[in-house]
């Protein structure tokens, strides 16, 4: 445990500045003060940060082979993303050697961010948020038109998210970009929480099939992959 003076010397700040930072960190739960010595030690929220980092690394490590297998099986690009506020962040992206090539102009890669509301993975991740959290995220989102079929009305988006919760997958039909379709499903951890989403993306220039045909062909392999990943993360569906 360290006192204010010790912490100030360690980080090169004066006492008053150190106290302000420490007070904020203690209020947030990252530091805790011993009532007798008045010194500080790491708080419980630091454990959460550690687990978040471990889980993030674990997800990508566990999911990689299944994402590649899904891409090879379907012949299309497969991605995995997590939610960060009203956006999704790509944490893995796999291409099949036999997939057709086409220019989407999105230039997506690991680390890319997109608005959640107009992506299939984003809709999966939004749909499984607590109601109050979901309302806050939607309120913070500019529902701008990104593709020819983007959902731009709040009520329509909430209906679509309810359907995702009910069916267990999300379809994106030219909501992000013209000609782009994708199907996404959730990845759950050992507690059952949705911690990531996986999608398979196709383009009309490669496969100009009906939405029903896309879902019929891709839903089963996508569900198998996300179930395998979730199982490896410790998820056990309730009987």
Image (cartoon, rainbow, N blue to C red):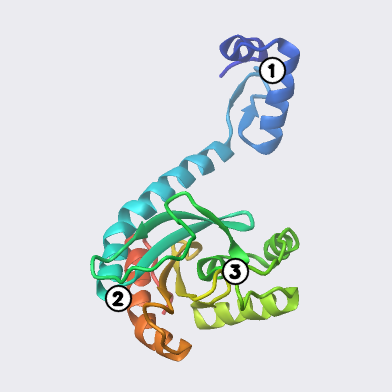
Residue closest to the eye, 116 or 55: 116
What whole-number distance in Å separates the C-alpha atoms at marks 2 and 3? 23 Å
Q: Quadrant of residue 93?
A: bottom left
Which residue, given by chain and number where applicable, does mark 1 sit on? 18
Residue 162 percent coordinates (x, y): 62, 79
- Of mark 1 and mark 3, the one earlier in the sequence is 1
Q: Earlier in the sequence, mark 2 or mark 3?
A: 2
Secondary structure beneath dot 2 equals helix
Q: Can residue 189 be seen in this snapshot?
A: no
Residue labelled with disc 3? 118
Instruction: Residue at 39%, 81% (x, y): give it.
Output: 219
User: Does residue 235 sit above or below 38 in this rendering?
Assistant: below
Q: Is residue 165 above or below residue 125?
A: below
Marks 2 and 3 close (CB-CB < 8 Å): no
Chain-order first, disc 2 or disc 1: 1
| In the rendered image, the vertical position of residue 158 relative to residue 213, given as above or below | above
Nearer-the-camera pick, 42 or 143: 143
Q: Is residue 32 above or below residue 217?
A: above
Q: Does residue 232 show up?
A: yes
Q: According to the image, label 2 marks what residue?
A: 74
Dot 1 alpha-carbon crowd within 10 angstroms: few under 14, some 14 to 19, many 20 or more: some
The answer to whether the residues at label 1 and label 3 have Cβ atoms under 8 Å apart is no
207 vs 158, left or right, is left
């Amino acid at each position: 445990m360290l006192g204010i003076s010790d912490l100030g010397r360690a980080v090169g700040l004066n006492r008053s500045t150190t106290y302000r930072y420490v007070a904020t960190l203690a209020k947030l739960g990252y530091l805790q003060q011993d009532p007798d010595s008045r010194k500080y030690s790491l708080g419980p929220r630091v454990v959460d940060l550690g687990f978040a980092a471990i889980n993030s690394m674990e997800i990508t490590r566990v999911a990689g082979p299944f994402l590649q297998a899904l891409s090879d099986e379907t012949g299309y690009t497969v991605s995995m993303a997590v939610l960060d506020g009203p956006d999704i962040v790509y944490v893995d992206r796999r291409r099949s050697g036999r997939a057709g090539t086409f220019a989407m102009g999105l230039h997506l890669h690991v680390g890319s961010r997109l608005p959640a509301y107009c992506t299939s993975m984003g809709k999966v991740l939004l749909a499984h948020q607590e109601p109050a959290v979901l309302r806050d995220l939607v309120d913070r989102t500019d529902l701008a038109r990104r593709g020819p079929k983007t959902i731009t009305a709040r009520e329509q988006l909430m209906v679509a998210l309810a359907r995702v919760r009910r069916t267990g997958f999300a379809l994106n039909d030219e909501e992000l970009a013209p000609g782009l379709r994708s199907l996404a499903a959730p990845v759950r951890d050992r507690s059952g929480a949705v911690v990531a989403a996986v999608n398979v993306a196709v383009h009309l220039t490669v496969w100009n099939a009906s939405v029903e045909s896309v879902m019929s062909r891709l839903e089963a392999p996508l569900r198998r992959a996300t179930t395998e990943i979730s199982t490896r993360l410790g998820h056990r569906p309730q009987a």
